[in-house]
Image (cartoon, grey):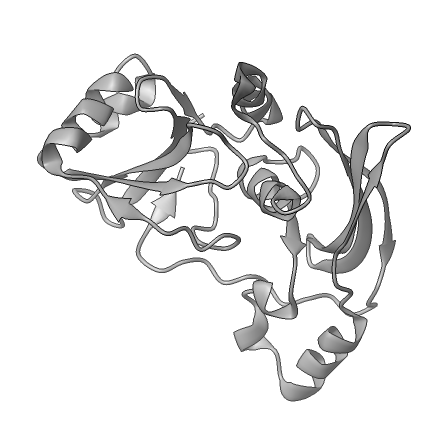
Amino acid sequence: MVGSLLFRVAYYIMYEWKTLEPAKAKEIIAAVKSSAEAGLFSEDSSECRTAALSFYRNNQIYRLTNYQTLPPFSLDYIGDGLRFHYLDGSAQTIYTINDTGALNLNHDNILDYIRFYFQYVQAEDSEIRALLTPHDHQGLNSMNKEHFEEFGRHFRAPNIDYDHEQHLYVVKLTLDNEGALVYGTINVTPAGRLTIADQHLLMQEALPPALSSQGETTL
């Protein structure tokens, strides 16, 4: 699926990246060699960074970046240092990781998980982004004062509940659905299965497009 998935880097979660030493980066590149995408990286022209995720035990996000191309591009993986899963845009990849026992959802990290999910899962019919605060939308710089004030008036903060009968988190939050500002209900099971239960429009005027990150593309 390389080349078919373009994610906006750093749109959702500002990860606290740590750059690995060259020797460790070499090990990571070697560990993902079984995937076809690994041939895009070499020890001399690539960098490996990693960051912790609040909702995974013993697993982190790894970003391999090839600086030999213009612009540089990256592939993101979830791994425990030995086994790695390429984030290919499908929900099933995330569910496979969850089913290894790595997932540890709770009230404090459920919003992180939802943002992560929408960052890395490409919907078939629309692109959805979770907005936890008005400043999460990176189209703010293209808004005029009146539009920003209108956006702020319609924005609604997240609300988290847990349905003990159905055994799932019920999260209500603001979403950017292809430029439409909507308020949605997201259901998430303890195993991390996520569904959108409903959405309703908050604002008639479309949001400006989100700005892409400069200088780096994530595939």
Q: Can you name the residue that lies furthest to the top here?
A: 34
The quadrant in which residue 64 appears is top left
User: Is residue 42 visible to the viewer in this orientation of the structure?
Assistant: no
The quadrant in which residue 10 appears is bottom left
Frontmost residue, 151 versus 115: 115
Q: Tell whether 1 sits left or right of 155.
A: left
Q: Tell whether 38 sits left or right of 210.
A: left
On-image quarter of the N terminus: top left
Q: Position of residue 11 (x, y in %)?
A: 50, 55
Q: Tell whether 205 sits left or right of 16.
A: right
- Residue 23 vs 198, above or below: the answer is above
Q: Position of residue 26 (x, y in %)?
A: 15, 27
On-image quarter of the C terminus: top left
Q: Tell whether 63 sits left or right of 125.
A: left
What residue do we see at 69% from left, 44% from top? 107
The quadrant in which residue 145 appears is bottom right
Q: Position of residue 186 (x, y in %)?
A: 78, 42
- Residue 171 vs 212, above or below: the answer is above
Count of numbered circles on the image: 0
Q: Can you name the residue that lies furthest to the right here?
A: 165
Q: Position of residue 35 (x, y in %)?
A: 33, 16
